[in-house]
Image: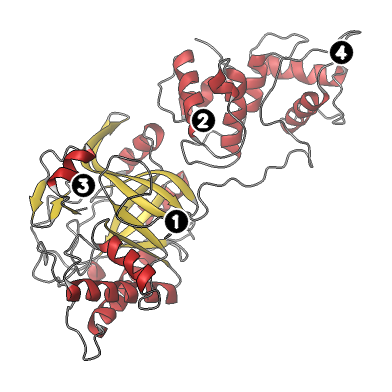
Amino acid sequence: MPRPVLPLARRAASGILLGALAITGLTVVSSAEQATDAATPVPAPTSQKVKKAKLVNVVTPGDFTGYGFDQCQAPSQAKMDRWLASSPFLAVGIYIDGNSRACRNQTYLDATWVSTQLANGWRLLPITLGPQASCQPRFPRYDDDFKISPKANANGTFSTALQQGIAQASQSVAAATALGIAPGSTLWYDLEGFDHNNTNCRESALSFLSGWTQQLHALGYVSGVYSSAGSGIKALDDARVTRPTAFVLPDQIWIARWDGIASTTTPYIRNSGWKPHARIKQYQGGHNETWGGVTINIDRNYLDLGQGSVAPREVYCGGIAVPSYGFSALRPPTATSVPPANQVKALQCLLQEQGLYAGRIHGKFGPRVLAAVNAWQSNHRMRVQSAWSRRNWVSLLSAGDTPVVKFGSTGPAVRRLQRALSVAGTDATAKAVRATGVFNAKTDKALRAWQKRVGVEVSGVAAAKTWKALQAGKVKR
């Protein structure tokens, strides 16, 4: 996405290398938003033929705190799969609509692409780049796009701009519907940087965005606005504070501020707005990144949306409490030693879920438990013995399906990973992990430490090789 140029001193202080990015007037042109076909006008998206989704997809991006990227052309399926398994990202921005966007022709983006990414766990950020602020110097881009009308009514309102925003929202919802993007999802309007001190330019842009938000709400979608921290986002925040009833404000904001800090804060706006969980910040502009051997030119983003990453409540064996950490080796009781009842209950429950234990869950390590323990050990080519070892715990706690999970992921697979890591590691990093069901920074750190120790690619991503090693009970190289 093109971005506003910061004052020279501020750019230097930010530490972000703009490199070879093209700078024109008020904006920096991100290579992630450029496309090779940008110079050739093509028919507007309303005339494009796209496949209609057959199934109802999940709302996107939903509740999420984590990392994302945006790139003008939606990447191929092969690239998306590689990046899912190797990169830190779980969200991706896609340009679905807008006559002013560079990438009008999308090679891969259709309803099948959308449903596949959502099924794989990606969070999508559908972007529209339509009419731009009247004082934005780089637009119109083609002969058939136009700017936001700066014409004011006699009473000082901007009804033409408002109607333009309403019309654009209707067009964007049609594009989203054709791609299978479900109602309740956030649609993002990309308003490139402009001179917010130009009154008519600023006020007409705010009126346009007000119309955009009103119509999205009427059609069942959530309104998001992307813009530079120092122009569009500042204008929205000032209106929120000084004129709270003048405009219908977006539900979520996407702040362009290339400060290299993965957060949702910026000194350009107040912390009281769109918090908690209603912000994205694009903190790094166009650059190449390589994950899984695949290089894509991207902008980097940090997201905190909805309720943030939250995990559903877990239930085991009709209400058995499986500890979130602190698993130890277990042995049948002796005259001087009795294994902890809560851990034996967890063992009985988990072995029951695997179809190996059919007795009562009472916390006693008796003959039936030992038989189930030996069956698990034998089935997993481990030493068959009366003791239940750390390796045994790692293999059982991680057992189950093997989806890709990483920072920001939530759910049962994350809890299984966290419990397994708390046992597989021996250092403070691993012992700090708790089975919250939310893949947080502690989980990321513990996973990387374990991956390094056992010889799995250190990525902070639990993909196929990581799950295979955990389910084999691997605790060291």
SS type, badge 1 = loop
Q: What type is the residue that disc 4 sits on?
A: Pro
Question: Residue 356 appears in which quarter of the rendering?
Answer: top right
Q: CA distance from mark 2 to mark 1?
A: 26 Å
Of label 1 and label 3, which has the lower sequence position? 3
Question: Is 442 left or right of 32, judged from the image as shown?
Answer: right
SS type, badge 4 = loop
Q: Residue furthest bottom?
A: 154
| Above or below: residue 280 compared with residue 53 | above
Of label 3 and label 2, which has the lower sequence position? 3
x and y percent of residue 132 in the render?
A: 19, 68
Residue found at x 36% / y 75%: 243
Task: Report the disc number at residue 60.
Answer: 1
| Above or below: residue 444 compared with residue 5 | above
How many other residues sit within 10 Å of disc 3, few (<14), some (14-19) or many (≥20)? many
Question: Residue 134 appears in which quarter of the rendering?
Answer: bottom left
Q: CA distance from mark 1 to mark 4?
A: 51 Å
> Can residue 128 be seen in this snapshot?
no
Q: What residue is pinned by disc 2? A: 442
Of label 4 and label 3, which has the lower sequence position? 3
Q: CA distance from mark 2 to mark 4?
A: 35 Å
> Can residue 149 be seen in this snapshot?
yes
**Quick one: 308 or 219, which is closer to the camera?**
308
Q: Are marks 3 and 2 in contact (CB under 8 Å)?
A: no
x and y percent of residue 305 in the render?
A: 45, 53
x and y percent of residue 11 in the render?
A: 18, 43
Task: Report the disc number at residue 333.
Answer: 4
Q: What residue is pinned by disc 3? A: 32
Q: Are marks 2 and 4 in contact (CB under 8 Å)?
A: no
Of label 2 and label 4, which has the lower sequence position? 4
Q: How many marks?
A: 4
